[in-house]
Image: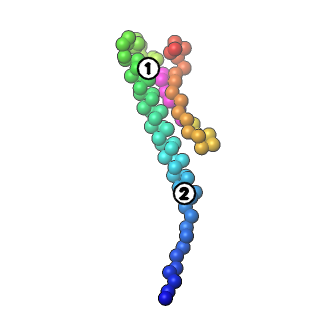
């Protein structure tokens, strides 16, 4: 009777890194989508577009702090509220 040879390889770090990468990609995609929704909302009645300044100022950013991924959508135009 023979004994089979085998090796155990740990890929946990690679797995975690790939999960983090995919989470960052997903948050970026969500930020892009939410930015688009915010811009489209200006088209709904009552239509709130005159010069397009507000719509063009709406942007998104993403942040990754200690494994926590966040997307921020907003504008710096003072009359946005």
Q: Secondary structure at mark 1?
A: helix
55 or 69, which lies in front? 69
10 or 81, which lies in front? 10
- Residue most toward the bottom? 1
The residue labelled by disc 1 is: 55
- Residue most toward the front? 1
Give the residue drawn at x 51%, y 83%. Answer: 3
Q: Position of residue 24 (x, y in %)?
A: 51, 42
Q: Position of residue 20 (x, y in %)?
A: 54, 47
Residue 14 occupies which quadrant of the picture? Answer: bottom right
- The span shown in magenta is 55-62
Give the residue drawn at x 38%, y 11%. Answer: 46
Q: Secondary structure at mark 2?
A: helix
Q: Position of residue 51 (x, y in %)?
A: 41, 13
First in sequence: mark 2 vs mark 1: 2
Q: Is residue 75 above or below residue 79?
A: below
Give the residue drawn at x 51%, y 52%. Answer: 18
- Which callout, 2 or 1, points to the residue nearer the camera? 2
**Label 2 close to label 1 by CB (< 8 Å):** no
Residue 34 occupies which quadrant of the picture? Answer: top left
The residue labelled by disc 2 is: 14
Give the residue drawn at x 50%, y 81%. Answer: 4
Q: Classify 10 Å Cα crowding around label 1: few (below 14), some (14-19), many (20 and above).
A: many
72 is within the stretch colored magenta: no
58 is within the stretch colored magenta: yes
Q: Is residue 71 above or below residue 9?
A: above
For the residues marked 2 and 1, what is the alpha-carbon distance in whole angstroms? 41 Å
Q: Classify 10 Å Cα crowding around label 2: few (below 14), some (14-19), many (20 and above).
A: few
């Amino acid at each position: 009777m023979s004994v089979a040879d085998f090796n155990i390889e740990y890929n946990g770090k690679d797995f975690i890194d790939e999960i983090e990468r995919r989470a960052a990609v997903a948050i970026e995609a969500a930020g892009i989508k939410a930015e688009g929704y915010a811009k489209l909302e200006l088209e709904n009645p009552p239509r709130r577009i005159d010069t397009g300044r507000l719509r063009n100022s709406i942007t998104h950013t993403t942040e990754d702090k200690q494994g926590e991924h966040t997307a921020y959508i907003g504008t710096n135009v003072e009359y946005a509220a």
